[in-house]
Amino acid sequence: MLKLAILISGRGSNMEYILKSVRKNNIPIEPTVVISNNPNAKGLAIARKLGLSTEIVESNGLKGGNWEYDSKIVGILKKYKVTPQNGLICLAGFMRIISPEFIRQYKGRIMNIHPAILPSFPGLHSQRQAFEYGVKYSGCTVHFVDEGMDTGPIILQSVIKIEDNDTEDTITKKILRQEHKIYPEAVKLFANGKIKITGRKTTIS
């Protein structure tokens, strides 16, 4: 069976929805470990409550995209048998850039959720970018991770309408509700072998 690892830095709400969906819907994937770079991440307690093992790898000043740091993550993944052959890694609010070496090892097996309709508003503070730009619609995107900034093949997207009285905070909450729907769905599709990557495009059978 496929093995699932989730990487978090904070509250872990997407992590929680993924884990509960796997159990509720009998998704054929085994959650094995939740890893955080932040020892104070609230999501760690949630993961333990749900019966998951947790591991902490503190950044200790190492910048994102650093293989010295990521090699420790990969070591933990292999310890829990989340391998490049049978693993899926979900980034759920993991506030570090992944190194090219890590991405190449797990190519097509690392997913991320981004709070915007990519390719619009990549990077940090996407909700604020959308609000300040004055767009009428925004949303979220689940995509595979590649070596660019939020540039990997898109799996699923969900759109929200931005009303005249919306604020950055209300936009963020609207988007988060959609994230909680499409991230577990993307994991389900992957676990059932429904996603095919061709170049930078995905097709869902």
Image (spheres, rainbow, N blue to C red):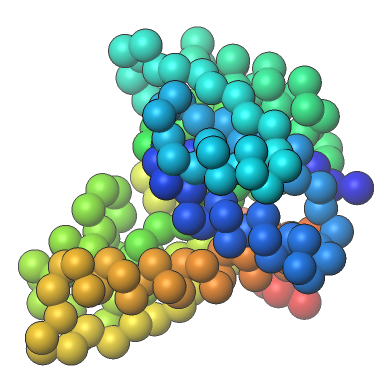
- In the rendered view of the protein, which quadrant contains the C terminus? bottom right
Taking depth in this image into account, of 113 and 9 the one nearest to the observer is 9
Q: Is residue 75 left or right of residue 151?
A: right
Picture layout, residue 153 above or below residue 94: below
Q: Residue furthest right?
A: 1
Figure quadrant of residue 72: top right
The answer to whether 106 appears left or right of 72 in the picture is right
Q: Give the residue drawn at x 68%, y 17%.
A: 75
Q: Nearer the viewer, residue 149 or 130?
A: 130
Examine the rendering and report whether any part of residue 77 can be seen: yes
Residue 23 coordinates in the image, percent (x, y): 77, 61
Q: Is residue 62 left or right of residue 203?
A: left
Taking 192 as reference, is 183 left or right?
Answer: left
Image vertical order of residue 102 relative to residue 67, above or below: below
Where, by quadrant of the figure, is residue 62 drawn?
top left
Q: Residue at the location (44% across, 40% down)? A: 42
For residue 201, say whether it is visible.
no
Tell me the residue at 28%/87% (across/down): 161
Give percent across and percent down for residue 43.
Answer: 49, 42
Total numbered circles: 0
Residue 158: give x, y in percent of width and height. Answer: 45, 78
Image height of 10 relative to 141, above or below? above
Nearest the viewer among 173 and 100 is 173
User: Residue 1: where, in percent of width, then height?
Assistant: 91, 47
**What residue is at 53 percent from the left and 22 percent from the top?**
56
